[in-house]
Image: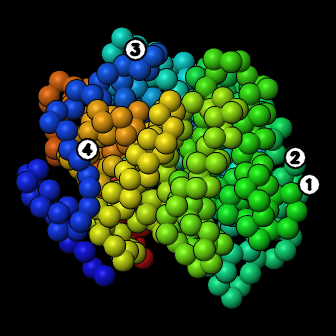
Amino acid sequence: MKHETFHYRTAEEFRDKLRELGLEIPLAENTDALFRPLGRIPNRIVFQPMEGCDGGTDGTIGELSLRRYIREAEGGAGILWFEAVAVVPEGRANPRQPWLTEKTLASFQQTVEKVKEAGVKKNGYAPVMILQATHSGRYSRPEGTSAPIIAYNNPLFEKDAPISADRIASDGYLDSLPEYYGRTAALAEKAGFDGVDIKCCHRYLLSELLSAYNRPGKYGGSLENRARLLLEGIDAANAATGRDFIKTSRLNLYDAFPYPFGFGTDLREGSAKRDAGELFALVSRMKERGVRLLNTSMGNPYVNPHVNRPYDLGGYVPDEHPLEGVARMIAGVKELQEAFPDLLTVASGLTYLRGFAFPAAAALVESGSAAFAGFGRESFAYPDFPNDLKKGELDRKKLCVACSKCTELMRAGSVTGCVLQDKEIYLPLYRARCMKK
Ligand SMILES: Cc1cc2nc3c(=O)[nH]c(=O)nc-3n(C[C@H](O)[C@H](O)[C@H](O)COP(=O)(O)O)c2cc1C
């Protein structure tokens, strides 16, 4: 189905479209709610983790990443959720993905110091910084070519060509990983981060395990088994760091694949109907381990990207209107926040809404449907938006247009950023890597 591109200029036009589609995306009268501090966090705007793919092959932080995070800190967001950082070398998504070890610690330390300093200098506060600890599982490409480590063969992804059995992570291998999550957490604390995210989204290893219903052994079958690595990863982070160091996760609330191949459904064979039963049981267990902050997401950026980051333009045309994707993400976080009122949730997937993203985000915070509003692609396009919004000086020409070029660059094996707004750096790269074919 080909859908119209985003063209709604007024709140009325936008609401008319929502009515036509039968969707709910409330808009607040103003965006004040986004600027209410919460504890030590200066406002409710989170810059979501966004891979820049520009680190050193040794795992150190690259110059472009440093530039990006400094710009983000100066822009005024309350939380900078640092991009995916590998816990083991074989779990890197690309050869330039940061990897935190004793050897690369200094590079992380200097980055955090410079980024926080930049925030204090510009705004009088440093953003809270969370490091996202990851194992890329089936999307591991440590040498630049696919070297998957999967939880199980999935006929929806593999079709008729199952991945060889030696690429299925053994129980022994999975048993070895919590230690690395613990080490990464300890090093993140040393580097000056405020917290660590045991990443469990987008069908990377921990997220894929959540749907390993038919995997035999201690990591498959029951929820307890499927969530074992996530929960033991949190335990390891707890054991390795101080009480005040935030332990959190970016969690897929819903994979949008049918049972038994997707987490977050109603557990009827072949059904992809979203159902929060298992999710709530899992979140209760995470809460017992001290998790208070939870970043949310959905889908798989490689297989159903429209679920993960609704967009207008790009190679693949989804079978739903992008506003349906945004509304699903909002419904998911709202449901979770209402079920766990003392949890601090982060909403995702709002960038598609252009200027309406801010009143939509404020409505979520104001109504208690989410504690924070996360912005991914917008942080690439318009890192200054928090301060501009606060001053009432938002520049609509700078907004992300959901063109997917940042993803195209990344998939082409390049460093990535906003091709349209950060032209000097990324447009020549886009021309060279993505337009010549
Ligand atoms: C280029 C690119 C890199 C991303 N890197 C990460 C990442 O490292 N970790 C993560 O959890 N999500 C990552 N995401 C997903 C975003 O954090 C976010 O969930 C998604 O873009 C939808 O939010 P938005 O509508 O605000 O952009 C990435 C997305 C893009 C486009």
- In this rendered view, identify the residue nearer to me: 26 or 232: 26
Residue kind at label 3, given as amino acid type: Tyr
Mark 1 to mark 3: distance in Å? 44 Å
Q: Are marks 2 and 4 in contact (CB under 8 Å)?
A: no
Q: Are marks 3 and 4 in contact (CB under 8 Å)?
A: no
Residue appearing at x 73%, y 22% in the figure: 241
The answer to whether residue 90 is visible is no
The quarter of the picture where the N terminus appears is bottom left
- In this rendered view, identify the residue nearer to me: 26 or 355: 26
The residue to which callout 3 is attached is 125
Query: Is 50 placed left or right of 167 in the picture?
Result: left
The residue to which callout 1 is attached is 172
The residue to which callout 2 is attached is 176
The residue to which callout 4 is attached is 360
Residue appearing at x 87%, y 49% in the figure: 175
Secondary structure, mark 4, is: helix
The 10 Å Cα crowd at callout 1, few under 14, some 14 to 19, many 20 or more, is: few
